[in-house]
Amino acid sequence: MKQNSWQTALHLRALKLSREHRELEVEIISVLQEIDHVKLYRAFGRTSLFQYAVQELGLSESVAYAFISVARKCVEVPVLKAALGELSVHKASRMTSVITAENVRELIEFSQTHTTRELDFKVAGLKPKRAAKPRVKI
């Protein structure tokens, strides 16, 4: 499809905003890590970083949870933070329950070449199986 000048300009604007969005996600992660470290949320009368993110920053509960889980996992696994920007916080949050220093590179690479649904299946396969609850027959 041939593009005219306004289509090209609109596309370039979308690309610029997309890059800025990823950069802002990384900045938000860094700020949340610092806020969590110094417990700044207490100065605002909040008992948790989650409360602060929802009630003071106005993030939705799902967005706040995603950012906080990724921010905390990045402290444990710094390679994850280095990958942010190329990897969205949304996809990174899907991996936080299973990501370790040993599997971080594999999971990041997988997430960059697969859909979120495929990533969810991969993560589910990495979770330890829970023991079945004993059943009592009467």
Image: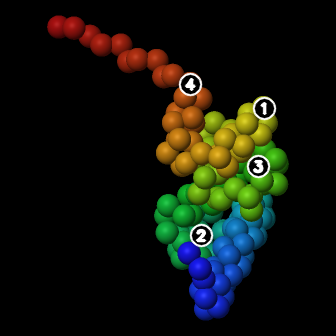
Which of 16/101 is in front? 16
Find out whether the residues at labels 3 and 4 contact each other: C-beta distance under 8 Å. Answer: no
In this view, the mark in front (2 or 4): 4
Residue 65, x across and y down, in percent: 56, 58
Give the spatial CA distance, label 3 vs label 1. 12 Å
Mark closer to the chain start, 3 or 1: 3
Residue 92, x across and y down, in percent: 65, 51
Q: Name the residue under label 3.
A: 80
Residue in the image at 66% along x and 88% along y: 9
Mark closer to the chain start, 4 or 1: 1
Q: Name the residue under label 4.
A: 128
Give the spatial CA distance, label 2 vs label 4. 32 Å
Mark closer to the chain start, 3 or 2: 2
Q: Which residue lies furthest to the front in this view?
A: 2
Is residue 85 shown left or right of residue 64?
Answer: right
Q: Few, some or many C-alpha atoms within 10 Å of disc 2 (few <14, some 14-19, many ≥20)?
A: many
Give the spatial CA distance, label 2 vs label 1. 32 Å
Residue 103, x across and y down, in percent: 74, 34
Give the spatial CA distance, label 4 vs label 1. 16 Å
Give the spatial CA distance, label 3 vs label 2. 24 Å
Q: Mark 2 points at which residue?
A: 52
Q: Few, some or many C-alpha atoms within 10 Å of disc 3 (few <14, some 14-19, many ≥20)?
A: many
Which structural element holds mark 4? loop
Instruction: Give the amino acid type for the residue marked by disc 4 in the picture.
Output: Pro
In this view, the mark in front (3 or 4): 3
In this view, the mark in front (3 or 2): 3
The numbered dot on residue 102 is 1
Find out whether the residues at labels 3 and 1 contact each other: C-beta distance under 8 Å. Answer: no
Residue in the image at 51% along x and 36% along y: 121
In this view, the mark in front (2 or 1): 1
